[in-house]
Structure formats: structure tokens, C-alpha cells
Image (spheres, helix red, strand yellow):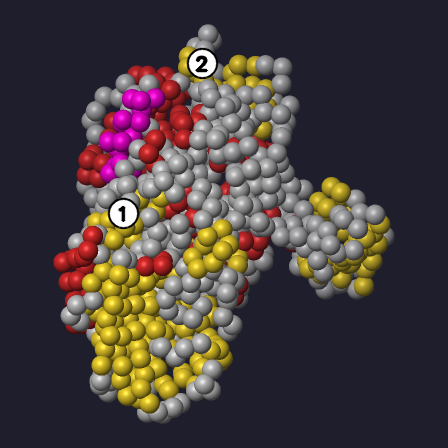
Amino acid sequence: MSLLRTRTRMSLITAPLLSGTLIAAAVPPSPSPVSPAAAAAPAVPACGKEADGWSLTSTRPDPTVGQHPYIGNGYLGHRVPALGTGYQGSEDPSGWPLYTPRYDGAFAAGLYAHNSRSDADRQAVAALPTWTGLEAGLGPGTASHYRQTLFMACGVVRTSYTWTGRDGRTTDLSYEVLADRSDVHTGAVRLRLTPRWTGAATVTDRIDGRGARRITAAGAAGAAAAGRTTSVSFRADGTHTPGTVASTLVPAKGIHPTSEHRSASGLSAARALIFPVRTGTTYEIAKHIGVDTTLTRATEASRRAAARGWRAVHSGNASAWAKLWASDITVPGQPDLQAWVRSAQYGLFANSRPGSADSLSPVGLTSDNYAGEIFWDAETWMFPGLLATRPELAKSVVDYRFRTRAAAAVNARKLGFKGLFYPWTSGSKGDNWAECHSWNPPHCIMQTHLQGDISLAVWQYYLATGDGQWLKERGWPLLKGIADYWTSRVTKNDDGSYSIKLVAGPDEYSNGVTDGVYTNAVAATALRNAARAATLLDTEAPAAWSEIADRLRIPYDNKAGVFEQYAGYDGSLIKQADTVLLLYPLDWKMTKQQAARTLAYYAQRTDPAGPAMTDSVHAVASAAIGSPGCATYTYLQRAIRPYVRGDFDLFSEAKGDKAGAHDALAGHPAMDFLTGKGGFLQTFTHGLTGLRVQEDGVHLDPMLPPQLPQGTTLHGLHWQGRTYSVAIGAKTTRVTLTRGAPFTLHTPKGARKLTTTLELPTRRPDLTPTTNTARCRPATATSEQPGFYAAAAVDGDAATTWSPDPAAKTATLTVDLGPGTGKAKITPSWEKRPTSFTATQKGRLVHLTVNGPAVLRELKVSRGA
């Protein structure tokens, strides 16, 4: 039974039991698929074939560094510059904590360094020498007939154009770049060169040290250009991690070099071939890259790939990618959403790999934004979508925490606590003082919710995989260590309840508070999950775990009927999702009414300029609550549309120039922001499906907003060795077992056994009867602010709003009421009333024209004048 302690304004509720039923059972063996049949995976286009929803194309060279496409295989990542090859830098600074100029960099997972130039000598990701350089040696000129395409189906970037030199000669060039997913220590570049002239051509294979950051050439042997393989060896500054980039140049038949030149210095090496060419003839040349910790292994990798040749490497890479895309999400009839969902999946796939113990930074291997370090972003925002679709990739997130647990134990002891304490930002080992950057304010020690976030991810991994051996060997040390930390971190109050003081919740505008509601709730969850794991492992859990979990204070505002963000919270602006995380991912026990009020209350108090991931949680929570209307779609749109940048659908951290209007450290937002992409992906994997993993099955409660009339299908979802698909239609949802043994589906109408295919009703909150004939009807506007879209005016939720761009003197909102519409009464409900407005009706269309700045909560239209 929960205990209630009342104050004048708020209640302190001790942590209630989780709503899910706990099944007492021995640790199960790791499940094995037993069904021989599997449904066909979604069609994946051939690598190099442009296809809607699978390829993203630019037809103009974009000079903006940071908005170029990238390739990756989870070990290697490389931005591909506008001309398809080599190094490109800029003077535009990156954001916190480095504030150094942006560049199109090359990175290797787990390679960290530190020196006096890297934010107080704290760790940051190191950058490799640029390895895509394959220069045609045509001199200065201009590009025409330009086309650059990212093929998300296979992780290849192709760039083609005609180069016209100052001498008037023209040459057609086509570059293709990949990081081989079938052999992750290798990458490749192919150049197809077609001169419109006859003479001698020069092609240079270059490893370019201008792209290197925080590494030093390894003595005299740093760069070498002997033999057919060139190489650059280095050591990471401070950490002294060794590494080598090796490149083997392979000219195709028909290329007969007359001479070659080699050069090597520091972190650069080059090999140039000079050969005769004839007009109209196409010449092909490829370079094969190897990256590893030693010269020998890197050279072997490079030559291994070269021996396979471009076509075999290209084919092997495409096959490896195709296997990943067996877990695809399709959104028919919605080309923008389809491209955005695939871009989100591509971002997570390209920056993770199976068998890794390196986690995901907010930007993966695409840049050194956020110093390339690991935050809660990995566990809370990127992990869940991967876990639902590709658990073998998600595993690296929790295995990274297992790998760095020794430093976590030292951190805890230094801070005077038991168990494990992970730093707010971490790199190679997890040392709080050598790696964490956030000391003003001191998030390195106050963002303690991270411990609970990690514990939750560990438990979710066990629930999703059923891997009892992993739980025993890796999961349990983390669950126990974090539970022990919480027992030493809490303070016992005179009334027998417990508090956690001096914390910063996910809302980074509030620091040093007491009883942050999310912090306390995730701590209680960590304690209970650890106790449950102890039972599964036939180990006795300390009694303090359950006692503290049940008696942690959970602030609640009785007057507003919502959970209070922290003790004494005054309703001030918050930076990002905090209290709403109780609704998801915690699934904290509360009534639908409490959930709806909590969502509405905090959605309206969230900084519109805050970071990109918040509205994805709003969307998932809205889908679960199912209030009448279609606000889920509004939140889904808000979770993606304001943040998409450029032709390659990269994700910006912010709508504008900074993520958080009141964050003094914000500015120069990160891109590609995988945190935001991971959150957006969850609107599908956990929002529209209602997916929640449990020990004994999967909970589904599908819903669909009317703006997706053709529905959506999630292919290749995984649970404990099975794969299944969920096809959400306008009336029914079809769940199909595609591989593995039958399992239990938990639904609002009870448990059902999935053996082949089951049909579930699709919830449609938009069909709830209403007197507002405008609700959930198609809405457009002549002007919108990012995130304040026309649909918000008719979605039935007063917490979402339409607002035109302040620069627009006049703006018109139009709603299509549908056929058979008679005369209607139009009543706008304002949050900010404009200087003047007019409301008119022309047949089935209703128009609301505003003059001056305005914020519209709801447009109500009723039949009859």
C-alpha cells in the first residue's frame, strides 16, 4: 500500500508498485527460433538504384559542413563532402563542449583522446585522417550536372558531376564511398573517370592529415608510402591508443601507369598514378581502406579488401545491410514520413554494430559534437527503438556500461557512495573526472537519474531477449551495483520516507533540487528491477531495496492533479521532457486522467526552443492515453518536422540556432542528432503500436491517427528469439509471427497466444463523438512556426497550438469540414489573441484569418449559425 503525506499545495506519494504483474520463474535459457517458415521481408532495392523512401539526393553542391551525408558500419564512420571525396573543413564552430570548427570527419568507435586543447584536458573522440581522398588531379574548375545520393538501403554515397577546368577541358567523375558492413575494419572508394579529352591523367590516393583531431603521428613511421599500400600510424593524445589507416590502390584493367609519385609526412600519405587516357573512355580505380590498432592488422585489412575487389566488397556490404532492413517500417502514402523514418533507422544502423562494447554518442560516428561522448541519450532515446528492431545492435549500449563498470565503482567510492556511479558524459573508461565535461552546473555529479536510466535499459534488454546467461553474467552486476548506489544516495526523513537531494533532473533548467520526480521514480524502478532479478537468479536481495523503493517520495500537485517535477516546483519553464518520462518509458502507475493532465501540464511548460527529442515522448504518451482527438499526430509531426535539415534528412538538435533558449551553453546545434532520430523512431515502435516488453510476452495496444489513412507496418520486430510484424490499419491491426515459437500477446482485452496471425482492434481516438465538426479534419495554413502547425488547431488538445510566423503580418488557417457541410458557427479559442481576425465559411471550407501575432489553442466549429 502506498503512503500519502500531505502538504498545503502538493502531496508526497511514496513510490507505488509497478502496474505490470511479476511472474515468478526460474531464469529461462536463451530462446531459440523453432518455426521454419518466415514471411518475406520488405523489398530492399538494389544498391545504387534510386528509389522513393530509400535514397536521398541533392542536385547542388552544398557548402555547409555538417549537412553532408555520411557512411558508417558501426566501427567506421565518415562524412562525405560535397564533391564526394577528401577533406572539407569550415570556420563554423560546433557546439558544447569543444566549440571547434566543424569539418567532414572520419571516426572509429571507441577511439578517445585528450590534450590541453580539448576542454580542460578531458576526453573527446579522436578523428582519423580523412581516408576518402581519391583525387582526379584536374586542377581548379567548376562542377555541373551535379548529383549526390545517399543509398540508405546499403550505406553508399555516390557523387557524380562534370568537372570543367580553367583550361576548358571537361571530365565526368563519379565517386562511390562505403564503410563495409561485412568487414567493419574496411572501407572503400571507387572513382569512375571519363575524360572528354586525350592525354595524361593523374589520380591520387590520399590519406589526409588535415582531418585528424587529437592524434599524433607515431614517430618516424607515422606515414608510409612504400609498396602498393600507403599508411598512417598514430597514437591518440593522452590515452595513447595506437591506430593505423592503410590504403591500397587498385586500378582496373585498361589503366597502364607510366609513372607514380609517393609522399608521406606526419599524418598524411599519398600515392599518385599517372596514366594515358582517351576521350570518351571510362577508367575505373578503387582504393580499399583498413583501420585497426596496429599497422600489420590495418594493412592486412586493406589488402584483404583489395583482393576481393570493388564489386565483391560492394556486394558483401549490400547483403549485410539488406539483412538489417528486414526490420523496416513502412508508411504507405506518406513519402515524407517514409523517408524520415528510414533516415532515423539508417542513422542508428550506420552507427552501431553487433558484438561491440562501444555505445552511441548523440551524433554517433558522424562528428565530434558533444565530444563524441556517451550520455543518457544512448539508453533512453536510441536504445529502445534498436531493441525492438535489432536487439543485437542495442546490446552494445548495455555492454558498454558493463565494460566501464570498474571506473563506475571507483567513481562511487570517490563520491562517498556504494555500488556504481556512471558519469553524465563518458568516453573510453567512464572515469568521472577525466571524461565528464559538465561541471558548470555540476551535472557530472547531479544528473543521477542516469544510474536509473542505465538500470532500466539493462532490465529492458533482459525482458526483450530472455537471455538468462547474459542477465547472470553481465546484467546482474549492473542492476545490483546501481541498486546499491541508490541505497547509499537516499536520505531518510523523520516520517520514515526517503528523499534524494541535490539532483538535476532531465530538465536542465533546474539544478540542485530535492526529490526530482523522475529521478526518484527511476530510482525506485531500478531497486525493484534489481530485486526481481535477484529472485530470478535465486539470490537474496537486501530488504532495503524494497523498503526504499516503496517509500521514496514522489511529489504530486493535488491542486493541478499532476505529478510535480520536484519538491516545490513552481510551474516554471522546463528545457525538455522530464516528468512526462513517468508516462513513458517508466509506465508509472497512474490513472488515465492523471496521465492526460500531466502530459498537458508539462507540454505547455516545455521550452519551444528546447532540444529535439521531447515531443517524441509526448507522442508516445499521447498514443497510450488516447484522449479524444488526434493530438498524437500533432506530437509526431512536432517530433520530426522542425528538425529535418538539408537534402539528406539530417536531424538537427534544435529548431533554431540553439537547443534551449535559457541554456547559456547551447548553440551551434548538433547534427546528425541521433538522440532525436531515436526518439522519433519510438513514436512508431512504442507509440502507435503500444509496444511494451514483459517477461512472459509482449503488450500491444495499437492506435492510428486519421492522418495515416493507409496505416503503417512494422516489420521484423523482435522478442526473445521470435520475430513478428505489426500492420496497423484503420480498423484492425494484424500481428504476424514470422519466426520462432508462439508467444503471448497482452492486449487491453486480455492475453492471446500468437501462433501465426492475430487481429486486434485499432484504437481510433479521433472517432470519439464530438460536437466540434472541425476536430481532426484536414487543416492547412499560409504560415506556421516550426512545431506550431495548423493541425494543432483541430486536434482536440488545448496543449497544442497553431501559431503563424511572427514575420507574417497576416495568416490564414483553412479547415476542410468535408462534404455535406451546412452553415457553421466558428469559435476560436486563443492563447494569444491577434490584433484582429475574421472567420468565414465557403462551402465545406472554413477560413480563419489573423492579423498580427497569434496563438490558437482550438478552432471549434459547430453546425448551425
Q: State the image quarter where residue 29 is shown.
A: top left
Which residue lies under the disc numbered 2? 497
Decide whether the magenta segment is chiefly helix, strand or loop. Answer: helix
Quarter of the picture holding the N terminus = top left
Q: State the image quarter where residue 85 is shown.
A: bottom left
Q: Residues within 10 Å of mark 1 (few under 14, many from 20)?
A: many
Tell me if residue 812 is in the magenta stretch: no
Which residue lies under the disc numbered 1? 236
Horizontal and vertical percent position of residue 299: 17, 62
Amino acid beneath label 2 = Ser
Identify the mark nearer the N-term, 1 or 2: 1
Horizontal and vertical percent position of residue 752: 37, 46
Q: Secondary structure at mark 1?
A: strand
Give the residue drawn at x 67%, y 42%.
798
Classify 612 as above or below 727. Answer: above
Name the foreground residue: 648 vs 52: 648
Amino acid beneath label 1 = Ala
Name the foreground residue: 379 vs 300: 300
Give the residue drawn at x 43%, y 57%.
103
Dot 1 and dot 2 residues touching (CB under 8 Å): no
Classify 397 as above or below 477. Answer: below
Q: Which residues lie in the magenta part?
A: 394-415
Horizontal and vertical percent position of residue 182: 24, 63
Q: Residues within 10 Å of mark 2 (few under 14, many from 20)?
A: many
* The furthest residue to the top: 494
Classify 251 as above or below 179. Answer: below
Horizontal side of residue 249 vs 490, given as left or right: left
Classify 463 as above or below 108. Answer: above
Q: Is residue 367 visible?
A: yes
Q: Secondary structure at mark 2?
A: loop
